[in-house]
Image (spheres, helix red, strand yellow):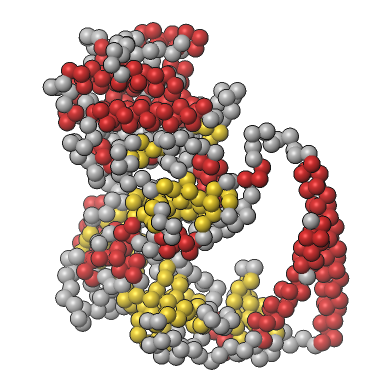
Amino acid sequence: MILVVFFASFLLSCLPFLHSATNHSISTSICPKSFVCPHLAPSKYPFYNATDTQCGLIKVNCTSYGGEIHLGRDSYQIQGNFVSDSSIWVVNKVFGKLVEKERCEALMYNFSSPSPLLYSTSIKPFIRLYKCTNNSTYDAQTEAYFHQFNYNSYNKCKDHNFYYKYSISNTTILSDLPLTCQAIRLPVETGDHKVLNETNIFSLLSSKFSVLIKLSPSCDKCHKEEGQCHTQNGQFLCSNAKMGDAHWHNHDGLKSTNTKKEKEKPHRKLKLILVLAGSAFILILSLLMFIIWRRYKTNPPSYYSSKDDISLNNEDGSLFYGVSVFSYTELEDATQNFDPSKELGNGGFGAVYYGKLQDGREVAVKRLYEHNYKRVKQFINEVKILARLRHPNLVVLYGCTSRQSHELLLVYEYISNGTVADHLHGELANPSFLTWPLRMNIAIETARALVYLHASEIIHRDVKTSNILLDHNFSAKVADFGLSRLIPNDVTHVSTAPQGTPGYVDPQYHHCYQLTDKSDVYSFGVVLIELISSMVAVDLSRSQDEISLANLALNRIQRCALDQLIDPDLGSDSDAEIMRMITSVAELAFQCLQYYSEMRPTMSEVLDVLEDIQAPGRIDSVKAPPPSEASDKTVLLKDFLPSPVSVTGEWHSESTVSTTLSVT
């Protein structure tokens, strides 16, 4: 082992020399004037062949049908010949599929320049589109503004309205745009070979267009002096192949490098001293690390508990916290380059795609939208939690990409039957499918999963119907642990900023910033009401005090109007047994939705009650939390039992605390 450490130290100490050699190789490498891909004309700088060393700015992968380039995160297939040294015709297949399916994502596409220090990109022909955020206060004003210019509108997208006028020659931007609007460019059909319907924006868009590459002034000057421009540590660098020198650029141009050799000698001596000092420091540091490693190997630090497997906390290319590490390329192939037609769903975290691995396993691949600190933290949190859990009602995590991967991807078992939300009030909603007995099973299986989580000292923190998956037998699988927290059993709560989904967040947690296992109980109470009513958790079309389904349910139950809450398709009017079970579940949900956490049952008690309700010969009343939990607030629970759904007359709650949450 000590030999490995010193060998690594030697390599590290040589990094400055290697870096210098690398810069020199870049500057002195002989780059071909042009290259040829099949079926394409010869291309020149700023394009370069992927098989060559980096002799340009934009890499071209030659293929049997031509070639491909990447700009930003998008891949473009080169069509036909290069128009000029800096312009090519391309096809964006992903954008084309979105246009073909008339998806709103196509209207929000971003054809941006990936590196403004080196070059910028523009597309041609294009149509200028105005994307305006939906805002009830300004919608009428925005509509009137664009109407005066005879602009067409498209308003079938959820969050935005779009305004446009077909013209491939109009390059002017409207002045004094409404505050909620911004101008974007999208590739457009020329109309030469296609009949265009100007009232349908999607019929105007084209996946084939020309991309013009314009070098920045500094890069253009570097290229004209037979140099190669690139960036290093956020700065512009010109490696001059002819001179064998590297020139640092300011934004204003090139710094002068025509200094005399006599002036360079002191700098070289200083560099040599710094390199030797750095190498000595790295060697000493490596020795200290080796000594510490040996010591910790013999006596692990006290903050590791005996149940932790320290060896799992390594990312060695095959395992990460005990789960498999997949390559980005492998998952890209499994999802057919994240084909939009393979998308299973999306949310605030990102999108989920169906995929099939090379070993035949069907998987769901979660693709996180952003690669920032918060997303990485949630990514690692979900891996760490799911790696240690095994339960038939929890989704199985197969693995993930490396944290250093091109993108953060999580790979789960594929659950084929959508989510509970889909079946209650989404695309798969069908009254004949999700019968009351199935809903009872879903409630019980979800409760079992949450009981298991709480016994494992884990709070889910985002329990909702869209996070409960259903397999082909309608068996429930709880998913999405990005917000979950570990809370030891000997700790009453943790203080943390509220996170979760509006309509499901525990109101006491929302107001007091104290997260407990009873926060999951509250969210599960909302799920129970959804199973009874088939309503969504938050609906802005409802009255102000009933936007939240929890508030609506409490209101109906307090007024003994449970019949106004029950989904009529469940058949409770004609089946007394179903009505009895729904009434009992509503009583249980009522207790789960109490403002004060002390007044709510535990998940274990919730599960017991649900199993009693489902089982023959069940008890007739809902169990209250044990007397040992009584406090000045829980005394009110005596007034809640029996709950309002099982008594006559109007009922009034003694709790004056509102459970309404603001929806932003």
Q: Nearer the viewer, residue 475 or 455?
A: 475
Q: Is residue 132 above or below residue 275?
A: above
Residue 595, quarter of the rendered image = top left
Please provide percent x and percent y for residue 521.
42, 26
Q: Which of 653 and 294 is in front in this view?
A: 294
Residue positioned 17% across, 23% down in the render: 572
From this viewpoint, is residue 150 visible? no
Quadrant containing the N terminus is: bottom right
- Is residue 524 found left or right of 258 in the rendered image? left
- Is residue 339 found left or right of 167 in the rendered image? right
Q: Is residue 372 above or below residue 463?
A: below
Furthest residue toward left: 574
Residue positioned 30% across, 49% down in the render: 135
Residue positioned 80% across, 47% down in the render: 294
Residue positioned 46% across, 35% down in the render: 391
Please provide percent x and percent y for residue 509.
47, 28
Count of residue discs: 0
From this viewpoint, is residue 196 visible? yes
Q: In this view, does 632 lie above or below 37?
A: above
Residue 480, quarter of the rendered image = top left
Please provide percent x and percent y for residue 380.
55, 46
Quadrant containing the C terminus is: top left
